[in-house]
């Protein structure tokens, strides 16, 4: 791509993300698996069939992440998987053996699999599993101790920036980059779903300006696929989109997640738009020529014209199909003498005049 920044590269396993690469598409499973490894595998398989590059979960050490009061608070939501918020969260967590099972399954699918770490214990948990990358949740942009801890693992980091001010993002970027230069920064709006008026997609361009060493992306919480395609056009090279098997399943995230048919269309459109953007060089394609000749005009005689006739503007017409002199060449004929007779509608050539 014209003007590509050679420094703006991020490698996750065997995938290289750059300004000229295809979009790296992450299906955010989150906790849409409902605490079931089998449902999670179904989500992985469906995501792979949609053409995504990676799937992602979320990892929390709930008892150390939440205050005791919050952990034990009554949770009456229709989407609750337990009577208290802590029990609800615990029901949605996988242990290490379950993560390993999912890693093996993702490997069989040739699918990149990683997770968001919400706390120090979760970083250690995921690092012990040799996860290929770490996701940073929007709320942790201001958690410099956690960011530095993750950065020291030396893995690629993808940081969402919902609910953050530019100064927060800059502070986080500087802290991470001083330890680990493998960072992507995602524009994000931390509302679920996000209103279109609050997506601020032009922040993607701003991030390109402010963070010239980092891959820029978009974590999409809006309904639909069009805004992610627009984000790619604006320079996002990572798109993260929540994914579900069925939007009416129990859980808070399903309602703004894409079902397989939507994810398949999103991946399809992102691949198409990358191809359609081209390299910025204006070309004439062989496929255009037949239609253009049919629609273009050539310079023809308005009536029968005798040899040695001095051409005037009323002797000339512009008619389809093309294939002769272009209309912009008319000034090369006016005032010149014909070297042969021309019939009405006959096309001029430059050799006809002197």
Image (cartoon, rainbow, N blue to C red):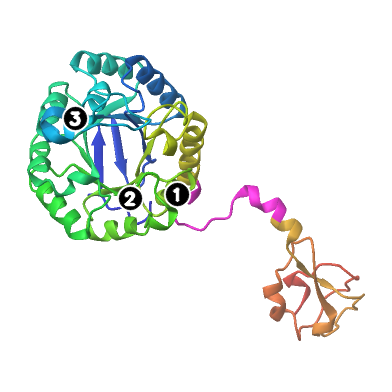
Do the residues bearing badges 1 and 2 touch, measured as CB atoms within 8 Å?
no
User: Would you identify the image quadrant in which residue 14 lies?
Assistant: top left
Q: CA distance from mark 1 to mark 2?
A: 12 Å
Q: For this view, does 340 lie left or right of residue 201?
A: right
Describe the element under mark 3 as helix, strand or loop: loop
Mark 1 or mark 3: which comes first in sequence?
3
User: Would you identify the image quadrant in which residue 61 lies?
Assistant: top left
For the C terminus, which image quadrant? bottom right
Describe the element under mark 2 as helix, strand or loop: loop
What residue sits right under mark 2 in the picture? 189
Mark 2 or mark 3: which comes first in sequence?
3
What residue sits right under mark 1 in the picture? 227
287 drawn magenta: yes
User: Can you give x and y, in whole percent of width and height, for residue 139 in the image?
Assistant: 21, 45
Instruction: Please tell me which residue lies in front, 58 or 333.
Output: 58
Disc ID at residue 60:
3
Describe the element under mark 1 as helix, strand or loop: helix
Task: Select label 1 or label 3 by which is in front.
Answer: 3
Q: CA distance from mark 1 to mark 3?
A: 29 Å
The answer, for residue 327, to whether it is visible in the render is: yes
- Residue in view at x 41 percent, y 18 percent: 42
Would you place residue 344 above or below residue 239 in this image? below
Mark 1 neighbour class, 10 Å CA radius: few under 14, some 14 to 19, many 20 or more: some
């Amino acid at each position: 791509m014209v003007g590509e920044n050679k420094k703006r590269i991020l490698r996750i396993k065997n995938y290289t993300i750059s300004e000229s690469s295809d979009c790296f598409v992450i299906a955010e499973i989150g906790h849409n698996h409902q605490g079931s490894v089998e449902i999670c595998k179904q989500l992985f398989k469906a995501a792979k069939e949609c053409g995504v590059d990676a799937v992602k979960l979320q990892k929390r050490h709930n008892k150390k992440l939440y205050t005791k009061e919050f952990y034990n608070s009554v949770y009456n939501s229709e989407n609750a998987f337990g009577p208290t918020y802590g029990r609800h969260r615990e029901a949605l967590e996988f242990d290490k053996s379950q993560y390993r099972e999912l890693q093996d399954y993702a490997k069989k699918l040739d699918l990149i699999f990683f997770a968001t770490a919400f706390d120090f214990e979760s970083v250690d948990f995921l690092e012990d599993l040799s996860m290929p990358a770490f996701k940073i949740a929007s709320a942790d942009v201001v958690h410099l101790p956690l960011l530095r801890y993750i950065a020291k693992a030396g893995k690629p980091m993808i940081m969402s920036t919902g609910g953050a001010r530019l100064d927060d993002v800059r502070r986080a970027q500087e802290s991470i980059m001083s330890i680990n230069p493998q960072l992507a920064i995602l524009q994000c709006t931390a509302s679920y779903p996000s209103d279109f008026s609050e997506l601020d997609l032009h922040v993607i361009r701003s991030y390109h300006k402010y963070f010239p060493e980092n891959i820029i992306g978009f974590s999409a919480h809006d309904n639909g696929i069009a805004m992610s395609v627009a984000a790619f056009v604006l320079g996002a090279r990572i798109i993260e989109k929540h994914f579900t098997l069925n939007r009416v399943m129990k859980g808070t995230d399903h309602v703004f997640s894409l079902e397989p048919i939507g994810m398949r269309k999103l991946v399809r459109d992102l691949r198409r738009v990358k191809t359609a953007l081209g390299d910025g060089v204006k070309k004439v394609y062989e496929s255009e020529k037949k239609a253009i000749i049919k629609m273009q005009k050539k310079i023809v005689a308005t009536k029968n014209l005798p040899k040695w006739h001095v051409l005037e503007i009323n002797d000339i017409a512009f008619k389809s199909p093309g294939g002769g002199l272009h209309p912009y060449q008319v000034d090369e004929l006016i005032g010149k003498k014909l070297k042969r007779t021309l019939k009405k509608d006959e096309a001029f050539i430059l050799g006809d005049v002197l």
